[in-house]
Image: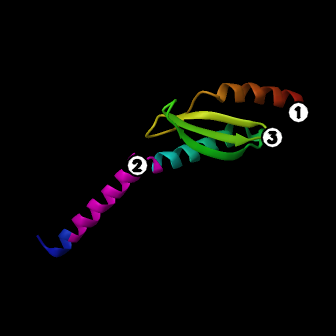
Amino acid sequence: MSSKKKKIIIIAGAFVLFVSVSWFSGLVPRQIAKIYGKSYVKNNFPEKQLEYGDIEWNEFYGDYIITFKGKDEKIYSSVIGPTFFPISMGQGVDGWEWNYAQYTLLTV
């Protein structure tokens, strides 16, 4: 095997190792959850103008919990899962939708 081929294999192996460690340590899924959650809120509750607060892993739920702060100073939080590819808003969103419906009725 040539030294160039060995270099390519070593670099590819290091890259795969880096991605695997980042993914399974929760670094990548946390960023996916953050991006998805912010996008979901922007698209589904635009008039509320919710500001991103924080995202954290919750062992009780086995998912991430994302929080936002509203103009009304209320804190809105929701679960995002599943663990390794968190692209599904879960528990908590129903309350947001009810609150949002009330908000839009009052502002119309």
The quarter of the picture where residue 73 lies is: top right
Image coords of residue 62 (percent x, y): 48, 32
Q: Quadrant of the C terminus?
A: top right
- Name the residue located 83 percent from the left edge and 30 percent from the top edge: 103
- Region of the chain picked out in magenta, as a range: 7-27
> Main structural element of the magenta stretch: helix, strand or loop?
helix
Q: Earlier in the sequence, mark 2 or mark 1?
A: 2
Amino acid type assigned to the residue bearing label 3 in the image: Glu
Q: Image check: 87 left or right of 52? A: left
- 21, 101: nearer the viewer: 21
Any mark on residue 107, and which? 1
Instruction: Please name the residue that numbered disc 2 is placed on.
Output: 23
What is the distance, in whole Å, between disc 3 and disc 2 at their CAs?
Answer: 34 Å
Amino acid type assigned to the residue bearing label 1 in the image: Thr
- Name the residue located 57 percent from the left edge and 47 percent from the top edge: 35
The mark closer to the camera, 2 or 1, is 2
